[in-house]
Image: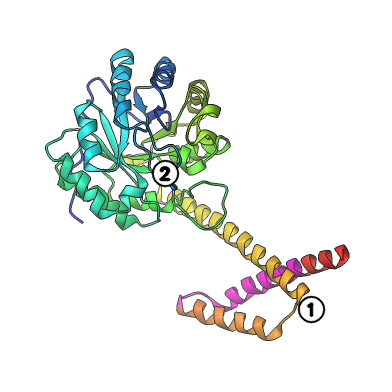
Amino acid sequence: MKNIEVKPWALQGFDMKKPIIIAGPCSAETEEQTLTTARQLAAQGIKLFRAGIWKPRTRPGAFEGVGTAGLPWLQKVKKETGMFVGTEVASAQHVFEALKYGIDIIWVGARTTANPFAVQEIADALKGADIPVLVKNPINPDIDLWIGAIERISQAGITQLAAIHRGFSTYAQTEYRNHPQWLIPMELRRRMPQIPIITDPSHISGKRSLLQEVSQQAMDLNFDGLIIESHCNPDKAWSDAKQQINPEELQMLLKSLTYRNPSIANVPRTLLDDLRTRIDDIDNQLIDLLRDRMNISRQIGVYKQENNITILQSRRYNEIIRDRNEKAEKKGLNPEFVSRVFESIHEESVLQQSIVMNKKQVNH
């Protein structure tokens, strides 16, 4: 991997001391809402203001941002409060408009990062610019795609770089809007230690109740900052209302965090800490997978009850154990250990099917 040159952000008067905090509403909705939120955040000491101008939405008909009309509002924020202002771009035209209106920081969104053609278009538009550019992880858990986007921006001559960790989409049901999968940004830190990593607890959480937990985890991993959505009236926000907090709540959240000292020799964390964190993340994924498996077992129980099929199917059980043992051995795992694990899983699966079938029988 080619070494990427990274320099501190050239924002006059801004201290890159950790943690870097970027805050502001998901979307710039009106001039009044934008300025009111900015004033309240400035009063809390926030120096970097964010607001979505162009909003990529999953389905048509949702609020997709006010567009270029909102950029003069960010100019007013900058002039009135002295804060630096930033927004997300998804095309070359967005880049041109943002630079024309003096936007201080831009970032590439998760959906855009997933498309190398779109990232290259943005990179080409940035040639000759001298501005901090942040790159969000792609929506799918692909670290090479993330690194590739950073490399494309770097090749355009941008040296004020950072990565934004905003979590990853998954079909599994989890408590998060986007699963953090901490292993991936940790691997990015290992491969590209010079790149600052800023975690986005708003998009990871999807709800206010998890913001503090995710923010603290990012600080425990010695990541470099947080980008948090803050709105003057979160419940009335036009987009992503559930994950936004007001500026006073933001200040309370930031004060609640424990900022730990880096380990000796400026190593982000000890190897033991990193390994334990990786185990915790894998264990959390295992719990989610076990929950999903039991949900399917209960559905099987319903099917068996409706079709008058016995719960225990010995041939199927033997096939499972034989198949899993063979796969375990190929992957270097102890087949006896895997047998014990799947025996326990099968026992619980049978129990869940029995509960469902007995319940339906009683109801009938």
What separation in Å lies between label 2 and label 1 (alpha carbons)?
Answer: 46 Å
Residue 60 screen position, x and y as percent: 43, 45
Q: Residues within 10 Å of mark 2 (few under 14, many from 20)?
A: few
Name the residue located 43 percent from the left edge and 29 percent from the top edge: 25
- Left or right side of 229 for 339: right
Residue where numbered disc 2 is placed: 57
Q: In terms of image quadrants, where is residue 208?
A: top right
Residue 129 screen position, x and y as percent: 15, 35
Q: In terms of image quadrants, where is residue 354?
A: bottom right
- Left or right side of 274 for 343: right
Q: Can the viewer see residue 189 in this picture?
A: no
**Residue projecting furthest to the front:** 61
Q: Can the viewer see residue 130 in this picture?
A: yes
Identify the image quadrant of the C terminus: bottom right
Q: Nearer the viewer, residue 195 or 82?
A: 82
Q: Nearer the viewer, residue 118 or 347?
A: 118
Residue where numbered disc 1 is placed: 308
* Magenta extent: 331-353
The main secondary structure of the magenta stretch is helix
Magenta stretch: residue 113 in it? Answer: no
Looking at the image, residue 220 lies above or below residue 356: above
Q: Residues within 10 Å of mark 1 (few under 14, many from 20)?
A: few
Residue 207 screen position, x and y as percent: 55, 38
Residue 110 screen position, x and y as percent: 36, 47
Q: Identify residue type, mark 2.
A: Arg
Q: Which mark is first along the chain, 1 or 2?
A: 2
Q: Nearer the viewer, residue 102 or 42?
A: 102
Name the residue located 82 percent from the left edge and 65 percent from the top edge: 360
Name the residue located 11 percent from the left edge and 37 percent from the top edge: 128
